[in-house]
Image (cartoon, rainbow, N blue to C red):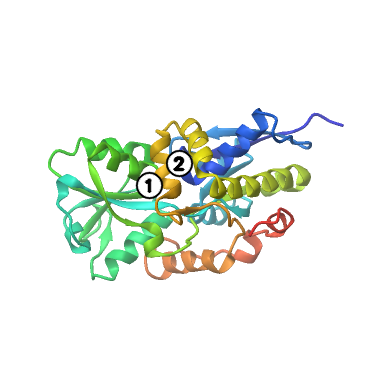
Amino acid sequence: MADKPEIKIGYLKITDHLILGVTDLKLKKGMEKFEHCSLKPVVKNGWNEVADALSVKSLDGALILAPTAMDLVKSGVDLKLLLFAHKSGSILVKSKKAHIEKVEDFAGKTVLIPYQLSIHNMLFHKLLSEKGLKPGRATETGIDVTLEVVAPFQMPEAIEYDEDGEIGGFIVAEPFGSQVIAMGHGEEFCLSKDLWPNHPCCVFVVRNEIIKKYPEAIQEICNSFVRSGLAIDAQPDAASVIGGNFLSQDKEVIRKVLTDPPDRILTGELFPIIKDLETIQKYMMDEMKIMTSQIDMEKFVDTSFAKKAGAK
């Protein structure tokens, strides 16, 4: 047999990507063994880094924001979506210095989002629109709330050093929200699951040429991710210790994210739901106008690996 390929998978240090951390640890400790490949997690600092690395093929796959993946496909990167990485799991945090009680109080403030093409941007847009408020970038006219893209790991510091409370808050994947709350600089405004229960967010994508070349290897990874997801849901205490190490975070913060409330983030149901992805695409086109054309979800999503892996 030829040398086993090393499959490089990009991720960020967010709770959304914990299935990769659990799988990585199981392999390192010999609790699982891959016959067809070795796995190499590649950490990135922000979403643009993940997107760029997939474009230039320095990554074989990644855990990435669903709308960002759609955009890459549109720009000609041949990707397939194989699994959801989780459901729900993000938080809208208000800065204590900004004195925000209700949605309308975000008017005149800046709110940080992790990426333009993110479920976070969509959920916040929906929340504001329902109150007749218009979010947008600082350069746009007639906006009520200014959106600024900041890498997730930089958000806690941005809130901490914002003396005048100009930043109303941020909406982002955990654990950065809970971290800011634990540090005493922010408070929970709402959880993303309250805005859209069981919403998709990050997905597992792999470059099509890699899938064609190493289908058994990719199946093996999917099988392990599904098992890891079930294990996180079943054993949050053990998972929070792994998460603390893998994501360089306080394990107590991770434990809170995994357990309080129990459906704050779900990792046990990773089967890709095409209808939900179409909802995101449609909203970003029709309401937000940040997507200009649609991709064919039936072509983009390959559920065969999820089916074989027994994903729920």
Judging by the rendered image, the residue that carries numbered circle 2 is 14
Q: Residue furthest left?
A: 164
Q: Nearer the viewer, residue 62 or 245?
A: 245
Residue 34 image offset from top left, x and y in percent = 74, 36
Residue 271 image offset from top left, x and y in percent = 62, 59
Judging by the rendered image, the residue that carries numbered circle 1 is 114
Q: Secondary structure at mark 2?
A: loop
Type of amino acid at the residue the image marks with label 2: Ile
Q: Mark 2 or mark 1, which is nearer the start of the sequence?
A: 2
Q: Is residue 52 visible?
A: no
* Residue drawn at x 60%, y 35% as measured from the top left: 58
Quick one: quadrant of the N terminus?
top right
Q: CA distance from mark 1 to mark 2?
A: 12 Å
Type of amino acid at the residue the image marks with label 1: Pro
Q: 277 left or right of 122?
A: right
Residue 188 image offset from top left, x and y in percent = 28, 51
Q: Residue furthest right?
A: 1
Q: Secondary structure at mark 1?
A: loop
Asked if the residue at tag 2 contacts the one at tag 1, i.e. Cβ–Cβ closer than 8 Å, the answer is: no
* Residue drawn at x 26%, y 38% as measured from the top left: 158
Q: 2 left or right of 128?
A: right
Q: 264 left or right of 26?
A: left
Residue 154 image offset from top left, x and y in percent = 33, 36
* Residue 256 position by quadrant: top left
Residue 152's place in the image compared with 28, above or below, is below
User: Residue 149: which disc?
Assistant: none
* Residue drawn at x 25%, y 57% as measured from the top left: 140
Q: Nearer the viewer, mark 1 or mark 2?
A: 2
* Residue drawn at x 19%, y 53% as measured from the top left: 109
Residue 132's place in the image compared with 265, above or below, is below
Q: Nearer the viewer, residue 132 or 140?
A: 132
* Residue 308 position by quadrant: bottom right
